[in-house]
Image (spheres, rainbow, N blue to C red):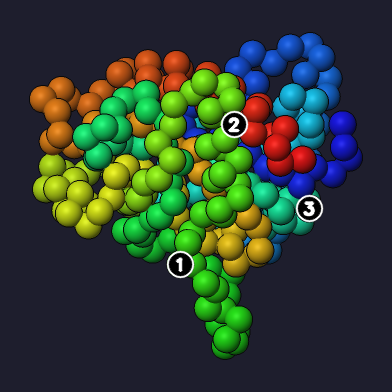
């Protein structure tokens, strides 16, 4: 295993460890690193692990037991720690609601755009130093090369993915109202989630290429007669995350 991987995977809801069932040999190879950052009293725990025989870092953004809700995640500390560890590429995984009628539960979507509806989150590393460098270009929030690797890898392993979508990032932790979903749809959002931002822009500020695999786990509020329940979401997650793991394992081959 390479001693310093330059790729990290950020796991979302339901994705708390890199391998669904770590084998003895994968457990042997995984190593925890604690990285101190200026953004948190406690250090950030990164697991250095192996995927398809390539070294990667893994970080579950909600913690190992989903103890950190979307608005309380220390996005700055996570991204800073990854940069300190030498990461220059991040593949992020997010559970989302589907808004586009084709993006039903179980769909994998690789967004190419986003709209940020979050508020009150620490959303920049540039805190007060008045420099023109603070204004990073964010026209295309996701890295084109990483997105292309994901799309190509999906085709190699026969997984269907939506290769373009606009990710509307809401504050949470509650789900949206039906009217909010109608508004997001009018705004052009195809999927809605709570953890896409400020993660994506913080990576950009530190020069880390970033792309996301979003897994649709429920229809957006009001788009179906069914009530969204955690039980239903968990069922979709357990099947969908297997697909996500297959996709990541293939993509890693193109990225190292
Ligand atoms: N809305 C926002 N975030 C989500 C949803 C949703 O419907 N499903 C999973 N994450």
Badge nearest the viewer, 3 or 2: 2
Residue appearing at x 37%, y 28% in the figure: 107
Tell me which label, 1 or 2, sits earlier in the chain: 1
Residue position marked by numbered label 1 in the rendering: 139
Badge nearest the viewer, 1 or 2: 2
Badge nearest the viewer, 1 or 3: 1
From the viewer's perspective, is 192 left or right of 247? Answer: left
Characterize the local packing of mark 1: few (<14), some (14-19) or many (20 or more) Cα atoms within 10 angstroms.
Answer: few
- Circle 2: element type: helix
Q: Is residue 40 visible?
A: no
From the viewer's perspective, is 179 left or right of 228? Answer: left
CA gap, disc 3 and disc 2: 24 Å
Residue position marked by numbered label 3 in the rendering: 86
Residue appearing at x 37%, y 46% in the figure: 165
Tell me which label, 1 or 3, sits earlier in the chain: 3
The quarter of the image holding the C terminus is top right
Characterize the local packing of mark 2: few (<14), some (14-19) or many (20 or more) Cα atoms within 10 angstroms.
Answer: many
Residue appearing at x 76%, y 56% in the figure: 84
Q: Position of residue 123 (x, y in %)?
A: 48, 64
Q: Which quadrant of the structure image shows residue 10?
A: top right
Q: Position of residue 26 (x, y in %)?
A: 77, 19
CA gap, disc 1 and disc 2: 25 Å
- Circle 3: element type: loop
Residue position marked by numbered label 2 in the rendering: 153
Characterize the local packing of mark 3: few (<14), some (14-19) or many (20 or more) Cα atoms within 10 angstroms.
Answer: some
């Amino acid at each position: 295993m390479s001693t310093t991987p330059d790729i990290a995977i950020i796991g979302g809801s339901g994705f708390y460890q890199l391998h669904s069932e770590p084998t003895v040999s994968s457990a042997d190879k995984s190593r925890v690193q604690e990285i101190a950052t200026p953004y948190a009293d406690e250090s950030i725990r990164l697991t250095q692990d192996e995927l398809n025989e390539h070294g990667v870092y893994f970080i579950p953004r909600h913690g190992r037991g989903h103890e950190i809700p979307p608005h309380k995640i220390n996005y700055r500390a996570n991204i800073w720690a990854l940069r300190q560890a030498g990461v220059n590429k991040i593949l992020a995984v997010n559970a989302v609601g589907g808004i586009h009628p084709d993006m039903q539960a179980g769909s994998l979507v690789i967004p190419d755009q986003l709209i940020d509806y979050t508020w009150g989150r620490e959303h920049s590393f540039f805190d007060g130093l008045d420099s023109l460098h603070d204004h990073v270009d964010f026209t295309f929030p996701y890295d084109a090369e990483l997105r292309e690797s994901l799309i190509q890898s999906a085709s190699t392993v026969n997984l269907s993915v939506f290769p373009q979508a606009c990710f509307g990032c809401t504050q949470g932790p509650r789900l949206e109202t039906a009217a909010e979903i109608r508004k997001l749809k009018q705004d052009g959002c195809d999927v809605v989630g709570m953890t896409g931002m400020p993660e994506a822009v913080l990576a950009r500020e530190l020069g880390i290429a970033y792309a996301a695999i979003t897994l649709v786990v429920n229809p957006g509020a009001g788009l179906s007669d069914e009530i969204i329940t955690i039980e239903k979401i968990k069922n979709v997650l357990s099947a969908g995350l297997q697909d996500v793991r297959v996709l990541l394992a293939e993509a890693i081959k193109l990225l190292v």
